[in-house]
Amino acid sequence: QSALTQSPSASGSPGQSVTISCTGTSSDVGGYNYVSWYQQHPGKAPKLMIYEVSKRPSGVPDRFSGSKSGNTASLTVSGLQAEDEADYYCSSYAGSNTWVFGGGTKVTVL
Amino acid sequence: QVQLVQSGAEVRKPGSSVKVSCRTSGGTFTSFVLSWVRQAPGQGLEWMGGIIPILGKANYAQKFQGRVTITAAESTSTAYMELSSLRSEDTAVYYCARVFRQQLVLGDWGQGTPVTVSS
């Protein structure tokens, strides 16, 4: 149960797009279409932004989109806004009622 | 709307145990799948284990096997996570989360419980 791999940081100017990647293995990301993404602001609980690779919960702006290819999933935030500055974590179902998370990516809005 | 409300901050000495509670409301507790996730200061999220209350069956991440016990009380719609043999590295915020069973995603989260391990 190794953590998924995310780049530590990403940045973009307001209005631009930023893409975060999340690499796992065939036992998690590559083996299931149950990849999710969470946004976390300092001192707050994680908030679900994407589930099942590319679906958005009600209330999440369509600026947030997800995709997957093989063992790597991606989250794209388009039209960056100041409030998008946060830590983002990917997660994947890993079978037998277990889950694994990525190390997190800090997104900075320049 | 399901809500998860966790117990308050804890301070423990190394070698001791801590038990954190997660009270749920707004749903049918026996239909839930609940997980526990922790986050050390400045670090990422780490899945610890989970429980299916209706089965009373818990499973744990390999890293925590033997040191964590997750239980559930149907009468109070509350889940518990007990971590023993505490060390300073266990200082973290501990979250409970409800799994959306169809989507296999941790969808609803508690507010978090800070646990500090210090002599």
Image: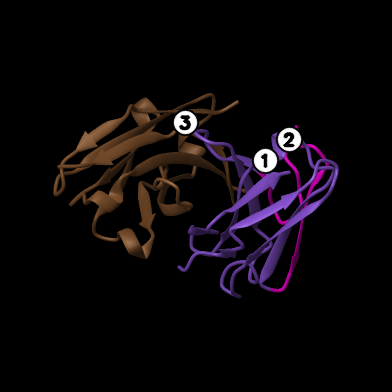
Q: Is residue A37 visible?
A: yes
Q: Which residue is mark 2?
A: A82
> In the rendered image, what is the letter of the chain coloured purple?
A
Q: Amino acid at mark 3?
A: Gln
Marked residue chain, label 3 = B
Q: Are marks 3 and 2 on the same chain?
A: no
Q: Are marks 2 and 1 on the same chain?
A: yes
Asked whether the beta carbons under mark 2 and mark 1 sit within 8 Å of each other, the answer is: yes
Give the CA separation, mark 2 to mark 1: 6 Å
Q: Residues within 10 Å of mark 3 (few under 14, many from 20)?
A: many
Q: Which residue is mark 1?
A: A85
Q: Amino acid at mark 2?
A: Ala
Occupied quadrant, residue A19: bottom right
Task: Reply yes or no: does residue A62 show up in magenta.
Answer: yes
- Disc number lying in front (1 or 3): 1
Return the x and y of residue A21 as percentages of the image width and height: 68, 62
A42 horizontally vs B96: left or right: right
Shade of chain B as shown in the rendered figure: brown
Marked residue chain, label 1 = A
Q: Residues within 10 Å of mark 2 (few under 14, many from 20)?
A: few
Residue sitting at 63 percent across and 55 percent down?
A9
Residue sitting at 19 percent across and 43 percent down?
B17
Give the CA separation, mark 3 to mark 2: 24 Å
Numbered range of the magenta stretch? A49-70
Return the x and y of residue A61 as percentages of the image width and height: 79, 37
Q: Secondary structure at mark 3?
A: loop
Q: Which residue is mark 3?
A: B111
